[in-house]
Image (cartoon, grey):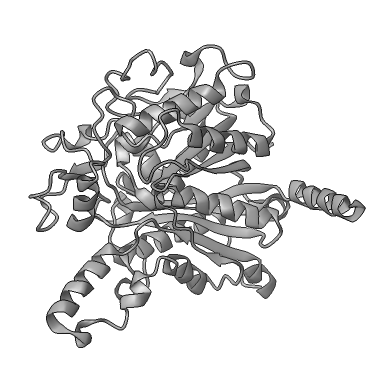
């Protein structure tokens, strides 16, 4: 028993000593290819949601004809063209979600200034990048080709292009990182789980640096049809795509599917300080939970979200009153937004929180970019990190009338335009089908 207590004390001391900070950011989103383009356009209340009817056959017959699409164009203009980001031959070998992941990882590593060559540094650098669905195009097209033409119509690259962990694999291979090589796949919680899990790998001493995030590219008629049949997608705004994603709004009617990737470089604090790296924020807490309730719907009271946020704050050793901002998962669905709203109010109001709901600062960037599924949590964590660094609250677009009912939606949702506000501590939430939930607590480094 004495040995157990001693081991537990030593373990907790080691865990507390290994602080984790963010030193690099990279993103490919419907607002632009690159973090700077994306962040600037988000604060300008721009929208990356457009019509899908012109991108290929099959979309025009679907009930939802809008999506968050990455703009085409040159890298310097904030657009995507593969040759600007990939080596020769990469495009053929990599699924689109893996291409977005490696581009975001490259940007994050450049931002962090982390280009190790020594064996020790390579062995202490790892990757965890996940995806919710991965390469649906490949699965669909190969299935059709196999059905029509048989064995020889299956590409030798079929399986490598299909596997979700190949995003992390390609990053590890390109840069020679020999530390943990891992991939989360937890539906729409994937990106945040990847970052949270990576932070723990550093805290536990398995790595000094982790490249972490999520990537998704499954805007395919089959995926849209599946989500539409599940009554998850927005179908009421096909003639006005930028207005279709409406988090917390009374007229919200489903989410808008999006694509992209977000990757961060996480680093053990002393390692970052030793090389004089710029520190964006510190990862203070990470909470996980399960709804244990339904495949796709949350409990009305938002219990799962509440438990994840409570765990994140417990690990961070912060009181609810210290939280300045919540970047909400809020996808623009009736049930999901209402449940999360109740959970946030439950944890941040009351004896240890604020007394007035209007003092709670909450926003959802999905009004601007749609729902990036497995990439959502990582991209939104980046927005939260930048909110802390710039003391600004990014806007919730299309929020005309919060509700329904209005008296429940009485927080500050940063409607339509960004707001300057001191942000020392923030939560970033992500939830997924199957009732899987995560919340990350981030704070100014001091």
Q: Nearer the viewer, residue 250 or 16?
A: 250
- Which residue is located at x 27 percent, y 51 percent? 70
Q: Position of residue 337 (x, y in %)?
A: 37, 30
Q: Position of residue 290 (x, y in %)?
A: 50, 44
Horizontal relation, residue 275 to residue 390: left or right: right
Q: Nearer the viewer, residue 136 or 293?
A: 293
> In the rendered image of this protein, does residue 411 appear above or below residue 101?
above
> In the rendered image of this protein, does residue 270 appear above or below residue 149?
above
Q: Nearer the viewer, residue 214 or 349?
A: 349
Q: Quadrant of residue 130?
A: bottom left
Residue 431 visible in the current orientation = yes
Horizontal relation, residue 224 to residue 130: left or right: left
> In the rendered image of this protein, does residue 254 appear above or below residue 399?
below
- Which residue is located at x 27 percent, y 22 percent? 250
Q: How many marks?
A: 0
Horizontal relation, residue 231 to residue 201: left or right: left
Q: Quadrant of residue 240?
A: top left
Q: Quadrant of residue 283?
A: top right
Q: Among all residues in the image, which is located at the extreme bottom?
A: 152
Horizontal relation, residue 424 to residue 132: left or right: right
Residue 395 visible in the current orientation = no
Q: Among all residues in the image, which is located at the extreme right?
A: 2
Q: Among all residues in the image, which is located at the extreme front?
A: 293
Q: Position of residue 350 (x, y in %)?
A: 58, 16
- Which residue is located at x 69 percent, y 34 percent? 317
Q: Position of residue 37 (x, y in %)?
A: 36, 44
> In the rendered image of this protein, does residue 316 appear above or below residue 320?
below
């Amino acid at each position: 028993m004495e040995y157990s207590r001693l081991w537990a004390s030593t373990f907790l001391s080691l865990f507390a000593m290994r602080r984790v900070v963010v030193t690099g950011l990279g993103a490919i989103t419907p607002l632009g290819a690159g973090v700077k383009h994306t962040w600037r356009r988000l604060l300008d209340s721009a929208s990356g949601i457009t019509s899908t009817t012109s991108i290929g056959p099959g979309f025009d017959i679907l009930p939802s004809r809008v999506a968050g699409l990455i703009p085409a164009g040159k890298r310097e203009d904030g657009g995507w063209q593969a040759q600007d980001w990939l080596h020769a031959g990469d495009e053929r070998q990599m699924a689109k979600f893996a291409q977005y992941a490696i581009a975001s990882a490259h940007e994050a590593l450049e931002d962090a200034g982390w280009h190790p060559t020594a064996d020790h540094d390579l062995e202490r650098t790892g990757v965890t990048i996940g995806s919710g669905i991965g390469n649906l195009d490949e699965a669909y097209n190969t299935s059709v080709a196999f059905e029509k033409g048989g064995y020889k119509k299956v590409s030798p690259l079929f399986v490598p292009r299909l596997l979700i962990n190949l995003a992390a694999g390609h990053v590890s291979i390109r840069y020679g990182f020999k530390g943990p090589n891992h991939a989360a796949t937890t539906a729409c919680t994937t990106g945040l789980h990847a970052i949270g899990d990576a932070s723990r790998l550093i805290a536990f001493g398995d790595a000094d640096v982790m490249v972490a995030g999520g990537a998704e590219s499954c805007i395919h008629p089959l995926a849209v049809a599946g989500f539409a049949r599940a009554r998850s997608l927005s179908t009421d705004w096909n003639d006005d795509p930028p207005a279709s994603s409406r988090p917390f709004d009374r007229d919200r009617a489903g989410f808008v599917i999006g694509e992209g990737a977000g990757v961060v470089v996480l680093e053990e604090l002393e390692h970052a300080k030793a090389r004089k790296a710029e520190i964006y924020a510190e990862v203070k807490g990470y909470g996980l939970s399960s709804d244990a309730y339904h495949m796709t719907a949350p409990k009305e009271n938002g219990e799962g979200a509440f438990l994840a946020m409570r765990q994140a704050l417990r690990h961070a050793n912060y009181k609810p009153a210290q939280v300045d901002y919540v970047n909400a998962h809020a996808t623009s669905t009736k049930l999901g937004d209402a449940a999360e709203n109740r959970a946030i109010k439950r944890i941040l109001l009351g004896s240890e929180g604020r007394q007035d709901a209007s003092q709670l600062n909450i926003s959802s960037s999905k009004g601007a970019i749609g729902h990036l599924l497995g990439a959502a949590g990582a991209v939104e964590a980046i927005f939260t990190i930048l909110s802390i660094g710039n003391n600004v609250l990014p806007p919730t677009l299309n929020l005309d009338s919060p509700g329904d009912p209005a008296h429940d939606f009485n927080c500050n949702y940063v409607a339509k335009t960004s707001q300057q506000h001191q942000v020392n501590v923030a939560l970033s939430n992500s939830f997924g089908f199957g009732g899987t939930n995560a919340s990350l607590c981030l704070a100014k480094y001091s």
